[in-house]
Image: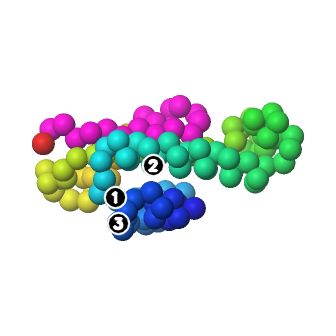
Amino acid sequence: MLHSHIDSSISYNGFVGHVGGDDFVCIIESSYENCVDICKKFIEIFDKEILSFFNEKDRSNGYLMALDRKGDFDVFGLTSIAIAGIYGIFNDFSSSSEISKAVAVIKKEVKKQKKSAYLIKKLTYI
């Protein structure tokens, strides 16, 4: 789904890679405004498509009850997506791990919303 969306959203090649688990990376060269549009549209598609993985009761409720990691029943929101991005010129980063750390800070911030959301921060220190 991610590959398809990126391929149809930009006029030249983008890179989509699997970092691990449910984390992916996309690298595209585009305007900030286009990146925002890509995120909004992908969230719209994701939120619609993910509903097919839930039964009618859970879809209607907007949550599900399930066992947590400790074996206790808990309430969980339906699956959402958090998109964290940085935009700008990356020359001041000395390594890919520095870039990963910068994105991780943004990801932590966007995940606080508890729903599908995105946050793209422009690099301002360059």
**Colour style of the rendered protein structure:** rainbow
Q: Secondary structure at mark 1?
A: loop
Q: Amino acid at mark 2?
A: Ile
Where is mark 1, residue-wise? 28
| Residue at the limit of the structure toward the front, as seen here | 11
Mark 1 or mark 3, which is nearer to you? 3
Q: Position of residue 10 (x, y in %)?
A: 39, 59
Measuring 19% from the left and 37% from the top, which residue is drawn there?
A: 124
Boundaries of the magenta span: 109-125
Count of numbered circles in the view: 3
**Disc nearer the start of the sequence (1/3):** 3
Q: Are marks 2 and 1 in contact (CB under 8 Å)?
A: yes
Placement of the N terminus among the 4 image quadrants:
bottom right
Q: Position of residue 50 (x, y in %)?
A: 69, 51
Q: Measure the C-alpha gap from mark 1 to mark 3.
A: 9 Å
**Magenta span has 117?**
yes
- Rate crowding at label 2 as few (under 14), some (14 to 19) or many (20 or more) other CA atoms within 10 Å: some
Question: Residue 38 has which mark?
Answer: 2
In the image, is 49 to the left or to the right of 105?
Answer: right
- Rate crowding at label 1 as few (under 14), some (14 to 19) or many (20 or more) other CA atoms within 10 Å: some
